[in-house]
Image (tube, rainbow, N blue to C red):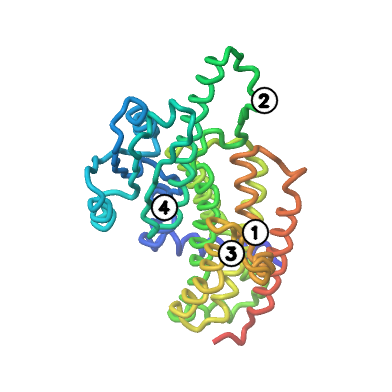
Amino acid sequence: MSLRRIRALTKKEFIQISRDIRSLIGALFLPLLMISLYGYALSLDVDRIPTMVFDRDESPASREFVGLVSGSRYFQIVGYITRNDEIDQALMRGDALMVLVLPERFSSRLKKGFQSPIQVILDGSDSNTATLAEGYIKTVAANFDLKIQKQRVRRAGLRLADIPVEARIRVWFNPEMKSRNFIIPGLTAIIMMAICCLMTALSVSREKETGTLEQILSTPISSAEVIAGKLLPYLAVGLVDMALVVGAGVVVFGVPFHGSYLTLFLSAFIFLIGTLSWGLFLSIVSRTQLQAGQLAVLSAILPSFLLSGFIYPIENMPLVLQGITFLVPGRYFVEILRGLFLQGIGLPLLWPQVLALLIFAMLVLRLAVRAFSKRLV
């Protein structure tokens, strides 16, 4: 390989990128736009669930229970119901996602030491929200029940320490339990996969359409030198994009970064080489930019979005799909980013994922070099 020829082709690619202002702006600012849009739009947190109350007891105890519900950040009391037929109307109109019904004699049964069941009616159209709301209201009921039990213990002349079990929960790695801290690192991997793969997927196919590829093929430059010359400029752009996206995640969204920036750079460098090389391979085997873009979406972007564990847990997938995820490089980079951002772990624990990315990058780079030849038309 000739470093002089690689340097000349790299310079030519930089000039071409700088002259295409729209593509350059898109490459640099589209990742920021994507992480801003998806970062605010994608959220697994369920807060302020619209709730209506049907208090048939209207006692101090029932009002106390309603106060616990309204005081939780997970529920928002939007109205009160006075008749049974209003429950269906509220749910069908979408005025509420949950209706809380407190029965008659709620307070008197509690005073007598009997069970006093309450009714919770949920709109199950959105099963995820309904499931979370069910868990939240059970927690509120458990806290209310614990308060009553403590009162009974005191009246019996016992100490609170006599209660046999008390759970004290401590959350590690994401103590605020914000889904944004979980989503942003994975979203970073998906954005980089999409942008970088598309950038190089359109490079060679664009030169085929404009005819400039024939001029390159008429020179004594080798396939490896062409791939290296085309890869290096986009690698530099990809690293800048990576820095911008990570910076936006930390500064704009406040996602904590507990790991090593050196480990982040190393893993991102290897990941980008593999991603850019795959884009180059798709560009080589495609005849048009449209075909290259379609192949990039089908072979890289969609698998990374669906099979990387970005949103859908891999453990919940069928066994066949779980096996396929081992072929998706985004899976390993998502695990690396989440480990660095949230857990602060380094190469001693992340080396299997880094090694997998390195193997992928070497194989795809070799595949791109072999696919490129002077017989391309």
Nearest the viewer among 20 and 205 is 205
Badge 3, how many Cα within 10 Å: few under 14, some, many 20+? many
Viewer-nearest of labels 1 and 4?
Answer: 1
Residue ID at (68%, 63%): 361
Give the residue at mark 1: 315
Q: Nearer the viewer, mark 2 or mark 3?
A: 2
**Amino acid at dot 4:** Tyr
> In screen coordinates, is 25 left or right of 306?
left
Q: How many labels does the image show?
A: 4
Secondary element at image label 4:
helix
Classify residue 21 by image quadrant: bottom left
- The answer to whether residue 329 is seen in the rendering is yes
The location of residue 88, given as percent across then percent down, is 27, 55
Q: Earlier in the sequence, mark 3 or mark 1?
A: 3
Where residue 25 sits, quadrant-wise, is bottom left
Q: Do the residues labelled 2 and 1 touch (CB within 8 Å)?
A: no
The residue under label 2 is 164
Task: Name the secondary structure under disc 3.
Answer: helix
Q: Horizontally, is 179 left or right of 36 in the view?
A: right
> Camera-side residue: 345 or 133?
133
Residue 38: mark:
4
Percent coordinates x, y for residue 304 in the rendering: 56, 63
Q: Which of marks 2 and 4 is in front?
A: 2
- The residue identified by callout 3 is 307
Amino acid of disc 3? Leu
Quarter holding the C terminus is bottom right
Mark 4 or mark 2, which is nearer the start of the sequence?
Answer: 4
